[in-house]
Amino acid sequence: MNDWKKRLDIVYSTNPDYHYNEEGSEEENTQPKERQLLRISLDKRNRKGKAVTLVTGFIGSDDDLQELGRMLKTKCGVGGSAKEGEIIIQGDHREKILALLQKEGYAKSRIV
């Protein structure tokens, strides 16, 4: 992999002890389910009139986010995606997702 492409916006440093740190290079630890504050909302903007349910506020690794998204998509029987700390579920499933999250132990989840 070409390492120089990741550093295109870095200006030259005269510090001999300088070490380049990539953004997001350290994996974020996933908070326990009881401490996650997940917000569930309905979104219709920029989706050609189609409604999607957004689950935001997840703090943790991408793998754990993908796993939670997969579980919600399976239980709701619809498609969607999970990336950048956000889970998108096709359709309006706010109440069902809230019940599923609370059953899984995400007690602080709420509909906004």
Image (spheres, rainbow, N blue to C red):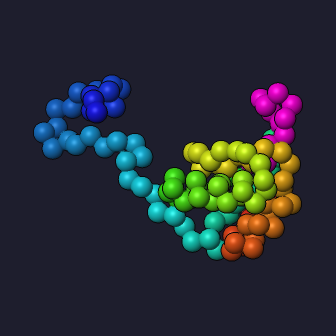
Q: Report the side of 83 relative to 87 (left or right).
A: left
Q: Residue at x 67, y 49 (%)?
A: 87
Residue 1 occupies which quadrant of the picture? Answer: top left
Closer to the camera, 75 or 37? 75
Magenta-drawn stretch, dominant element (helix, strand or loop) = loop
Magenta stretch containing residue 45, yes or no?
yes
Q: Report the side of 84 relative to 38 (left or right).
A: left
Q: Which residues are magenta?
A: 44-54
Locate residue 75, reporting x and y percent: 75, 60
Q: Residue at x 65, y 54 (%)?
A: 69
Q: Report the side of 44 relative to 104 (left or right).
A: right
Q: Quadrant of the C terminus?
A: bottom right
Q: Which residue in the rendered view is the most extreme toward the left?
A: 16
Locate residue 50, reporting x and y percent: 84, 35
Locate residue 59, reporting x and y percent: 57, 58
The answer to whether 96 is drawn above or below residue 25 in the figure is: below
Closer to the camera, 81 or 5? 81
**Residue 112 makes an appearance in the image:** no
**Residue 90 makes an appearance in the image:** yes
Closer to the camera, 9 or 60? 60
The answer to whether 37 is drawn above or below residue 90 in the figure is: below
Q: Report the side of 27 relative to 92 (left or right).
A: left
Q: Residue at x 80, y 63 (%)?
A: 98
Locate residue 26, reporting x and y percent: 38, 53
Q: Residue at x 86, y 60 (%)?
A: 95
Magenta stretch containing residue 31, yes or no?
no
